[in-house]
Amino acid sequence: MKLNIALLAGDGIGPEVIDQAVKVSNAVAKKFNHEIVWTSGITGAAAIDAVGEPYPDATHEICMAADAVLFGAIGHPRFDNDPKATVRPEQGLLKMRQKLGLFANVRPTFTFPSLIDNSPLKRERIEGTDLIILRELTGGIYFGERGRKDDGNTAFDTCTYTRAEIQRLAKLGFEMAMTRSKKLCCVDKANVLESSRLWRETVQDMEKDYPEVEVSYEFVDAVAMRLVQWPSSYDVLITENLFGDILTDEASVISGSMGLMPSASIGVHTSLFEPIHGSYPQAAGKDIANPLATVLSAAMMFEDAFGLKEEAELIRAVVNKSLAEGMVTEDLSGKNKAYKTSEVGDWLAANI
Ligand code: IPM
Ligand code: MN
């Protein structure tokens, strides 16, 4: 099979972790007789420096022409404390989501048996956790009308959702629940927000099409609590953009292995795969960042974008082997020897 993949390394540790995912993907392609055509594009601060724009048209063309996008991270600290900066790396991410129609962000949270004590939460609370948060990614307050009035002294951001946007996301949630333990939780704030009431109404209307799925409706504040108290009680959660942003960060600490969690953004035009961690600028260029989340994102890409499940499973098995054998970067090595980012990548590729 020929796989056309757009490669957006981005900022900070992005290029280093992406390199390892490329090594591993190429090894998989060789083993299974696939041909991967990688086409690189620039994004984020790197693109601002090069062309003054964080998601240039040329990069968009590359993504549109690809069957999938593998993405590193974007963001640079020089923009963080500058509220007056007019162009920011993050705008590139939002523009990319919007232009590629990446409407659903899929973030799994699961535990690795060998790393369970890395979690800040007690073992008995998190054991058996295997949940997915499905976050709506191109609507809501992120893309609503915003502005200032009263000479700049009043600011507003609006949250708007259409029934069609909710249905599109919820459909994916129901379908995902059907392939798992058939439990779906709709997370909203329907006791206060009108947009949440539309979410609830829409999902309730869809229940009859999926009679086997047990649907619960919970307020986002209560979910924030139960997520750390009893995460294994959840399976698939669906929610709007901002709630999803917050809950997915919260969920990412459950496993204690932020450097291991992959994600997918399902789109109208193409799909994008990326680690959930950020650009980790302090580690950039030092060859110390954990590449496993990006490698596992490549596994998600093989499975979800190309339907190549065996290839994906092989990548996951080799990652598990590296964890079991201590072939890991400094964030996971404890008192044992820490390996470099590139050494972990080479080892994974050699073990495919
Ligand atoms: C994320 C990030 C982005 C978001 C930022 C960088 C705009 O936090 O992918 O979760 O808020 O969506
Ligand atoms: Mn976020």
Image: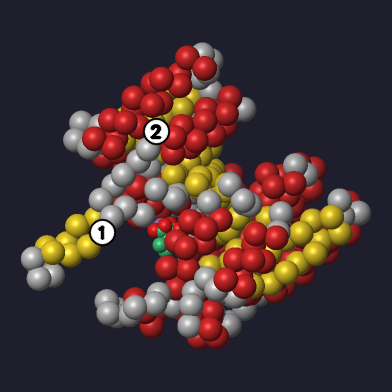
Q: Position of residue 101 (x, y in %)?
A: 53, 51
**Identity of the amino acid at label 2?**
Arg
**Identity of the amino acid at label 1?**
Arg
Q: Which mark is residue 146?
A: 1
Q: Position of residue 147 (x, y in %)?
A: 22, 62
- Residue shown at 48%/37% (left/top)? 169
Quadrant assignment, res 4: bottom right
**Mark 1, secondary structure of its residue:** strand
Quadrant assignment, res 23: bottom right
For the residue pair 169 and 278, the one nearer the viewer reads as 169
Q: Is residue 119 visible?
A: no
Q: Earlier in the sequence, mark 1 or mark 2?
A: 1
* Residue indicated by mark 2: 163
Q: Which mark is residue 291?
A: none
Q: Position of residue 296 (x, y in %)?
A: 65, 54
Give the spatial CA distance, label 1 vs label 2. 21 Å
For the residue pair 192 and 339, the one nearer the viewer reads as 192
**Mark 2, secondary structure of its residue:** helix
State yes or no: Cβ of the residue under disc 2 lies below 8 Å from any atom of ligand 1: no
- Could you tell whether 140 is left or right of 322 in the image? left
- Residue shown at 54%/34% (left/top)? 172
For the residue pair 113 and 45, the one nearer the viewer reads as 45
- Residue 255, compared with residue 279, is above or below; it is above
